[in-house]
Amino acid sequence: MKALPLTIRQRLTLVISFSALFILVLEGWYIYDYSVKFYEWEFRERLEERLFLADSLLTSDSLHPFTAISKIPPGYLPDEKIIYLSRLGNSPSPINDNSLPEALDTTKFHSNFIYFEHIGQRDFCIRHDPKTHETLVVSAIDKYGYTKIQNLRYAVLSGIGIGVILLSLVSWFWVKRMLQPITDKIKKARSIGAKSLNLRLDVKNEHDELGQMGIAFNEMLDRIENAFVSQQQFIRNASHEMRTPLTAITAEADMALLKERESEQYRQSLERIRQRSENLSQLTHKLLAMSRLESDSLLPQPCATDEALLSAVKTIKTTYPEHHININIEAPSALSLQVLCDPAMLETAYLNLIDNAVKYGNQKEVLVRLFNEPGMVCLEVTDKGDGIAEMEMEHLFKPFYRSIRHHGQSGSGIGLSLVKSIAKKYGGDVRIWSQVGVGSRVQFNLPAMVFEKYS
């Protein structure tokens, strides 16, 4: 049979109730056990006092022991009996017509001067002289002690029951009150949707656990809202960037089909369509690359940065055969240029950096240097173009941002944003230094692989 699901309130109440029951039982058992031992010790002290009194009278008149014992004042012990045996094993000479019970262990007479025995409801205090074989016994029934113990037992049991019931009711009330903020937060969280991401949970006390939970949830909502806004902005920008070449392709095709034209005119139209299609293809490739970066499908693996660089330069030279690219690889060994990264993404980052330098370098030589810094593999790309204004530096890594001076050139404005995402994905960074009229220098850094040394 499947157990019914319990709420936190119900579980906490049960845990508190069972914990209280366990603690109260332990405490009740300790009080009861201590009280029983105390009453037993107290009653035995009283028995021992009567025994010493009877023994002193016997000592004062050892020739007439029974006469001496008869002078003992009336006892204050319930159902008190005093027994004197002149010789162990002989017929007893009882006082008050009492005799020793058969259950009494007489073997202890020879090993203990005074000892106690409990038989039935009666307690015995016994003194035996092994030389004269005289035995003196004082016994009584602790009626008041038994009554106290019985009352204590009922009080402990009823106290445990009442305590558990009261604590359960109180804990039910306080747990409900303490968990009410969670209930309110759940209702508020359920009301938050895509159109109300600006709503936040109320935090009354930011120092307790509920307050910390509310702060953490609000921070998560901030991240979700920022990501949602960024995604919407990204989709709008991507749609606009894709719509532009598609509109141009459609317009060019419509113009070519509007009337009969010379073959050269058709060739020029097809060339413009091809160029627009290539731009659209590059944009799509970069958008897909950014989408892959946000997923967990790209597992890092050892990559040779020098091979990725040479492959990227080869692609650039195919696109821009007239441009000169000066490559300088500075490293003590090939192993020092190894990084953990996705090979395709590494080549994409290098390709975008060199492509930007060639595209905006005013047809001048581009310097590419691959080298090591402590714990890092660095690619430095330097151009001698127009440079970047200081006011534009903070916007360079935003998706689809393009400098005002470069709006007339082909490009999507997503390249540097993609490069920074790749660096961040694999624990690196990107740095840019630029001066208007002088040129720009970009450095792309990734952590170098660490190889264990074996002796």
Image (spheres, rainbow, N blue to C red):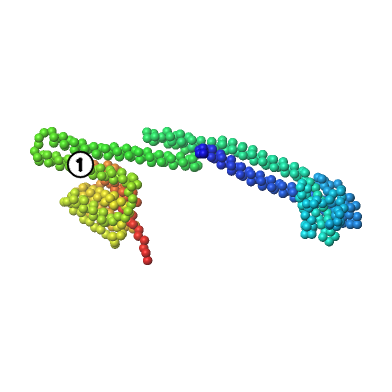
Q: Nearer the viewer, residue 427 or 205?
A: 427
Q: In the rendered image, which quarter is residue 338 located in?
A: bottom left
Q: Position of residue 451 (x, y in %)?
A: 35, 60
Amino acid at dot 1: Ser
**Where 223 falls versus 99 (above or below)?**
above
Q: Nearer the viewer, residue 184 or 259?
A: 259
Q: Position of residue 397 (x, y in %)?
A: 29, 45
Crowd rating for badge 1 (residues with CA inside 10 Å; few <14, some 14–19, many 20+): some
| Residue 78 seen anywhere in this rendered image of the structure | yes
Q: Residue at x 89, y 54 (%)?
A: 65
Q: Residue furthest left?
A: 262
Q: 64 left or right of 344?
A: right
Q: Position of residue 272 (x, y in %)?
A: 16, 41
Q: 340 left or right of 77?
A: left
Instruction: Give the residue pinned by disc 1.
Output: 277
Q: Nearer the viewer, residue 2 or 242?
A: 2
Q: Residue at x 12, y 39 (%)?
A: 266
Q: Residue at x 64, y 41 (%)?
A: 160
Q: Position of residue 68 (x, y in %)?
A: 89, 53
Q: Which quadrant is the C terminus positioned in?
A: bottom left
Q: How many marks?
A: 1
Q: Residue at x 27, y 59 (%)?
A: 330
| Residue 390 seen anywhere in this rendered image of the structure | no
Q: Residue furthest bottom?
A: 455
Query: Which secondary structure, mark 1?
Result: helix
Q: 159 left or right of 57?
A: left
